[in-house]
Amino acid sequence: MTIENPEMNTAFHRNDLPDDFVHGQSVAIDTETMGLDNRRDRLCLVQLSIGDGTACLVKIDHGQDSAPNLVRLLRNRSVLKIFHFARFDIAALLAAFGALTEPVYCTKVASKLARTYTDQHGLKALAREILDLDLNKEQQSTDWGSNTLSEAQIEYAANDVLHLHKIKIELDRMLEREGRMDLANACFDFLPVRANLDVAGWAGKDIFAH
């Protein structure tokens, strides 16, 4: 099922991406779940944008554990997947579909490495500083498992991916300027491993500690 919302430049799908989804060289991805524990709280929604001002939302039904087109994209190593707080989203997708997402970029990690003059690294703070855009985050803690999402939820979900490409460009510029791009790339490469550890039961453990 596909529902087009021209006013919001959003396409809505059920349980998988359409066969004709065009992703390009990079795609921004976010997820909405029933909570923060991937062992308990199911994946409800996956949002994607190729950076052209449009968003694709995939509603995941309860008990749905297969999304072949989406999984193919997650595993496609020729496509960079851009997240904000990638650790959580990669783990949520891995727990839901058994697919480890690679390669990845995380705007939250990039921000922490580049914007050391602040402790504000949420998407709202990044959008305000970099894009002069005030994102409404009121729908963050709502029932994403509902069969029908409100227009406010859909707008919120779309906004979580619509701006990540532009934010990445500015963060890359800052990382290069501060000489931290190589360090950032090493962190991005490790994120799928970190998410895999989370799903495997080491979420609260520092395995590198003494």
Image (cartoon, rainbow, N blue to C red):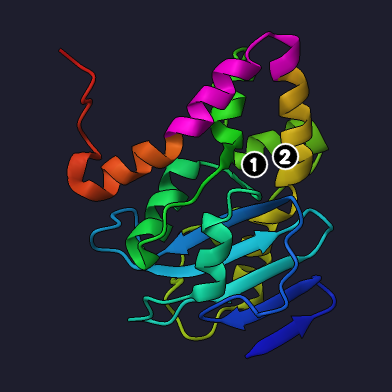
Q: Position of residue 96 (x, y in %)?
A: 36, 66
Question: For the residues marked 1 and 2, what is the alpha-carbon distance in whole angstroms?
Answer: 5 Å
Identify which residue, 49 or 79, lies in the foreground: 79
Image: 140 above or below 135: below
Q: Does residue 150 appear left or right of residue 8 in this picture? A: left
Circle 1 — which element?
helix
Q: Does the image show residue 112?
A: no
Q: Please name the residue shown 70% across and 45% down the image.
A: 164
Q: Magenta part of the protein: which range?
A: 175-190
Circle 2 — which element?
helix
Image: 114 above or below 21: above
In which quadrant of the rendered image does the N terminus lie? Answer: bottom right
Q: Please name the residue shown 70% across and 86% down the image.
A: 3
Q: Quadrant of residue 117?
A: top right
List the residue tagged with mark 2: 127
Q: Position of residue 128 (x, y in %)?
A: 74, 36
In which quadrant of the rendered image does the C terminus lie? Answer: top left
Q: Does residue 15 appear left or right of residue 10 in this picture? A: left
Q: Position of residue 43 (x, y in %)?
A: 40, 67
Q: Which mark is residue 124?
A: 1
Image: 46 above or below 174: below
What secondary structure is the stretch in magenta mostly built from? helix
Q: Please name the residue shown 56% across and 33% down the image.
A: 108
Furthest toward the left, the residue is 210
Q: Position of residue 109 (x, y in %)?
A: 54, 29
Q: Residue flagged by tag 1: what amino acid is it?
A: Lys
| Marks 1 & 2, CB-CB < 8 Å contact | yes
Q: Is residue 187 magenta?
A: yes
Q: Residue flagged by tag 2: what amino acid is it?
A: Ala
Q: Does the image show residue 172?
A: yes
